[in-house]
Amino acid sequence: MKESILVIGANGQIGTELVEELRHRHGESTVIATDIKPANAALEGTGPFEQVDVLDTSGLHEVMRRNNVKQVYLLAALLSATAEQKVKTAWRLNMEGLLGVLDLAREQSFKLFWPSSIAVFGPTTPRDNTPQYTITEPNTVYGISKLAGERWCEYYHQKFGVDVRSLRYPGLIGWKSEPGGGTTDYAVHIFHEALRSKKYEAFLSEDTMLPMMYMPDALRATIGIMDAAADHIKIRSSYNVAAMSFTPKDIALEIEKHIPGFSISYKPDSRQQIADSWPRSFDDAAARKDWGWRHEFDLAKMTDDMLVHLQHPVM
Ligand code: SER
């Protein structure tokens, strides 16, 4: 029976684009998209889709068995801002979801990708060029769940030989899908508003610098770590992966080069405190050395590409 790849949480910001990219590489019927909700507009009709809750381990197991699944991308999670509003739900989804899939990976021996985040760092972490190994005392529910998740991934690898691979994503920016509930979401919304109304009110202050990455780079990093030879993956908790860092003011200036008259204002809300606990930039030398990670997009190149595609959205 043909082997397939399962994407859990396929309706989300990463899932929507990852499913498309994996189908492009492996053929549409090889990639089974799943989500707790019915397929979103971008995914509908593009290939196999199964509606299943990640917390329903036996339902997931059944989908895996029927499709001879050999690789799983587990993307179902609540992001940082939403998790602060729904503490117990976030913990349950982010943590029990991962543990259930790790147990399935232990039994079924599939290769697993699970995303971590810059949110594993906290207010006591050095904020500039944050190293791979440093103080990790996150003070958000999301960050605590990601840090615990990293520990579980390493544990399942060491104790049970589970082939799990993980990246600490920075904020992700793309034009094909919308983020939901994150602290870095402003860097996507700003493009839509710039084109719609030539102005944007940021929920972070003008000088809040955060690490960010353009979605094509994030997809290459994700598929790159999954395709790397197992002995190149030296870190089984999660790898720092970086591309660029900027502030709301920096991105507004870059957008203004393309949209003269664009203006930004600032009204920091509760997400400011989350952003202030995260790195300004982080060091991904280990990913570059171990499995050859390279980014392609900086702020200028990303801005150009985003605006071209948002104005001419050909998939
Ligand atoms: N982009 C995510 C968030 O803002 C961080 O992983 O929650």
Image (spheres, grey):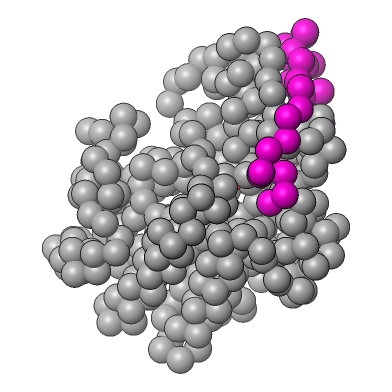
Residue drawn at (61%, 55%), measured in percent from left and top?
169
Where's residue 299, x and y in %? 75, 34
The picture quadrant where one finds residue 41 is top left
Residue extent of the magenta highlight? 250-274
Q: Residue 181: within the magenta?
A: no
Where's residue 244, x and y in %? 75, 45
Relative to 78, is 131 above or below?
A: below
Where's residue 165, x and y in %? 51, 69
Residue drawn at (68%, 33%), measured in percent from left and top?
203
Q: Is residue 269 visible?
A: yes
Q: Nearer the viewer, residue 147 or 296?
A: 147
Image quadrant where one finds the N terminus: bottom left
Q: Is residue 228 visible?
A: no
Residue drawn at (49%, 79%), measured in percent from left and top?
152
Q: Nearer the viewer, residue 81 or 155?
A: 81
The picture quadrant where one finds residue 139 is bottom right
46 relative position to 283: left or right: left
Residue drawn at (64%, 34%), measured in percent from left and top?
186
The picture quadrant where one finds residue 256 is top right
Where's residue 34, x and y in %? 28, 51
Relative to 136, is 304 above or below?
A: above
